[in-house]
Image (cartoon, rainbow, N blue to C red):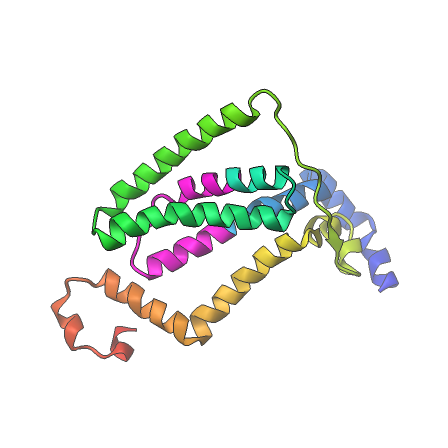
Amino acid sequence: TDELLAKLQGAPLQQVSQQLGISDTQASGAIIAAVPLILAGLGEQISERAGVMNIGLEGMMMLGALAGFSATLAGLTIWGGLIAGALAGAAAALVMVLFCVRSGMNQIIVGIAITLGATGLTSLMHNAWYAKTYPRLDAADRIALPGVSQIPVLGPGLFTHHPATWAGLLIALIFAFTYRKTYLGLNLAIGMTLWSRRGDPGLLTETPEAVL
């Protein structure tokens, strides 16, 4: 392992990173910024597979971000902030459920209303709470994966993160397994197919295997 690291610490990787202007901080920031988008995308994927087009996703993300930041700033741990953000997003999603799933209203209109409403609400609350002080959170503790975290440039950026980051990436793999290998994933696939083919008279005579 030491010999391999010594070779990786040679000129080629360092020179390429310098020529491209990529640092370990930039690589780390890219991973951290990607995790919220991955989680939101997975939630939207389930929603669409279930037959709901969640246009209000961005509004839910803003509400979750404000709630998570506020909860962590108030003294909760990062995990507590994540839970608070998830609950805020779920509360916004409940609006979509009540108006679209239960009442049958137009999903696009309701989704746009959620996004616009959440944009205004979070801007107002941020201005009222933090506009004068602009508080900051302390840096999160990070865990370095043994061995690979010592690779120049790529190691600190890709393999040194808070456990919440690893959890977010792991959830994506769990979702992929669920869609392909479980009955829940099969049911979601059938639901997405039925939604896309709604109004097709021939769909009523087909078996689930034929639908897929």
Residue furthest left in the image: 201
Task: Point out the stretch of residues depicted in magenta.
Answer: 39-65
Q: Is residue 21 visible?
A: yes
For residue 42: magenta? yes
160 up-or-down from 208: above or below = above
Residue at point 46%, 40% (across, down): 63
Depth order, front residue of 197/40: 40
Residue 161 x %, y %: 69, 51
Residue 150 x %, y %: 80, 54
18 up-or-down from 165: above or below = above
Q: Quadrant of residue 52?
A: bottom left
Give the side of residue 110 with respect to residue 124, left or right: left
The dominant secondary structure in magenta is helix
Give the side of residue 154 with respect to residue 62, left or right: right
Residue 19 x %, y %: 71, 39
Residue at point 63%, 45% (across, down): 76
Residue at point 67%, 55% (across, down): 163
Quadrant of image for the N terminus: bottom right
Residue at point 42%, 50% (across, down): 90
Give the side of residue 31 with respect to residue 212, left or right: right
Quadrant of image for the C terminus: bottom left
Residue 85 x %, y %: 51, 46
Q: Is residue 23 visible?
A: no
